[in-house]
Image: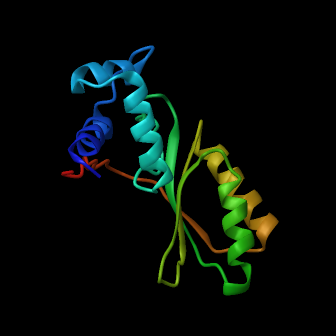
Amino acid sequence: MDDIDKAILRAIQSHLPIAQRPFLELGRELNLSEDEVIARIARLKEKGIIRRIGGNFNSARLGFASTLCAAKVPEGKLAAFIAAVNAHPGVTHNYRRAHAYNVWFTFIAETMQEIEAHLAELANQTGVADICSLPSLRMFKIKVDFPV
């Protein structure tokens, strides 16, 4: 990675321009062509430095419900359970943990009732009954920008 790659990474972490051609705008800010910005981002993605580019939305302000979920999944059911969790479009994160509750994921839907129905369906589908829903009582959000 050179200084230009680092400047691109700093810029796209939290300040990707909202525009019809965001990479053209970013290129103007960094004195690069749109094609060069796109090519560099593609290369950084191929190298695994960039995992994804996408928006982060405040789901509560959009009228959605969300919860953190934890599940006790027997070793023999892990792969099937993880695949079933990942198949739900409302799942935003899914992590395996070294803990009795070894799979943690976040779930967003229009209502808590919808989330509860999906969790019950997930339990029936996978045979994993111990799935806890832990909705937040108070939101603490930190901004994470990496000093590149």
Horizontal and vertical percent position of residue 57: 42, 34
- Relative placement, left or right, of 93 versus 27 is right
Horizontal and vertical percent position of residue 81: 70, 69
Which residue is situated farthest in the top direction here? 20
Which residue is situated farthest in the right direction here? 125
Name which residue lies at 40% across and 54% down. 49
| Residue 13 in view here | yes
- Relative placement, left or right, of 107 versus 40 is right
| Residue 56 in view here | no
Name which residue lies at 73% across and 85% down. 76
5 or 110, which lies in front? Answer: 5
In the image, is residue 128 above or below residue 75? Answer: above
Residue 112 occupies quadrant: top right
Q: How is the image coloured?
A: rainbow
Horizontal and vertical percent position of residue 74: 67, 84
| Label total for image | 0
Horizontal and vertical percent position of residue 30: 23, 27
In the image, is residue 86 above or below residue 18? Answer: below
79 or 101, which lies in front? Answer: 79
Name which residue lies at 29% across and 25% down. 32
